[in-house]
Image: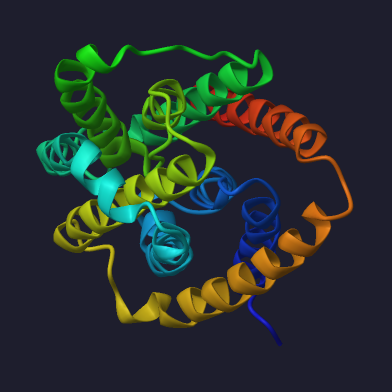
Amino acid sequence: MLDPILMFVGAVFAVAGVVKGVIGLGLPTISMGLLAIVMPPVHAAAILLLPSLVTNVWQMVAGPALGAVVRRLWPMMLAVCFGTWSGLGLMTGAAAPFGTALLGVALTLYALTGLAAFRLSVPNRWEPILSPMVGAITGLITAATGVFVIPAVPYLQAIGLEKEELVQALGLSFTVSTLALAVNVGVEGGLQPSIALDTIAALALACAGTWVGQTVRLRMSPAAFRRWFFAGLLVLGTYLIFRSVG
């Protein structure tokens, strides 16, 4: 008989993969949010690492702009690592009981900015100051929740990157965040042999879901799909907040 948790993990990553295939992001966000319903965030983050790394490296290298993106964003990437490692222990230490609530808050804020189509415009002259700040804040939130979209994604959308540059910049940011988070999860004891089967299932179904999502993208409006995606995140984030304080 199949383990219900394994079946749930597989279903979560299949859905998250479809979303990533359609709109280019959302796999870690959805996975962490749904897995937190049935397991501690540090365990969810451990299962997430390999699927996130594979899909985001794929996104990062699939294009001609990687060199330019790295040269422009390396201060932010260093700060992501610094912020994540500075938050070592937030998932398992004294703040661990608040991890699910913080995850809910992060998902809710991200959903609200997406539904509001909130867009900033950051002048190039501000990047040397803002990029490290955004990276460090993103890293701390990553260390506490396993979610690395706030404030990195709105910021990257605001600095005037071309479409292909933005796709690769998101892949770069998510890859660096995943690797930095892997260090934390390893030190915090989350990388256990017992998660191997869950991780393999997650990777296989995330890749399959991504392929399905890329097919779906040809048949529906990505803008409409994004609205449903953010609406679902809002419901999930609100649920996690109320469950953790109830």
The residue sitting at the bottom extreme is: 1
Q: Is residue 7 left or right of residue 77?
A: right
Residue 171 point in image, percent of width and height:
41, 52
Q: Is residue 225 left or right of residue 183?
A: right
Which residue shows up at 22% across the image and 13% down it?
126
The residue sitting at the right extreme is: 219
Residue 87 point in image, percent of width and height:
16, 37
Vertical placement of 48 versus 128: above or below? below
- Looking at the figure, which quarter contains the C terminus? top right
Residue 69 point in image, percent of width and height:
30, 45
Which residue shows up at 44% across the image and 31% down it?
153
Picture quadrant where residue 224 is located? top right
Vertical placement of 74 versus 214: above or below? above
Which residue shows up at 68% across the image and 30% down it?
230
Q: Which one is in front, 105 or 189?
A: 105
Is residue 110 in view from this perspective?
yes
Is residue 89 in view from this perspective?
no
Which residue shows up at 29% across the image and 74% down it?
192
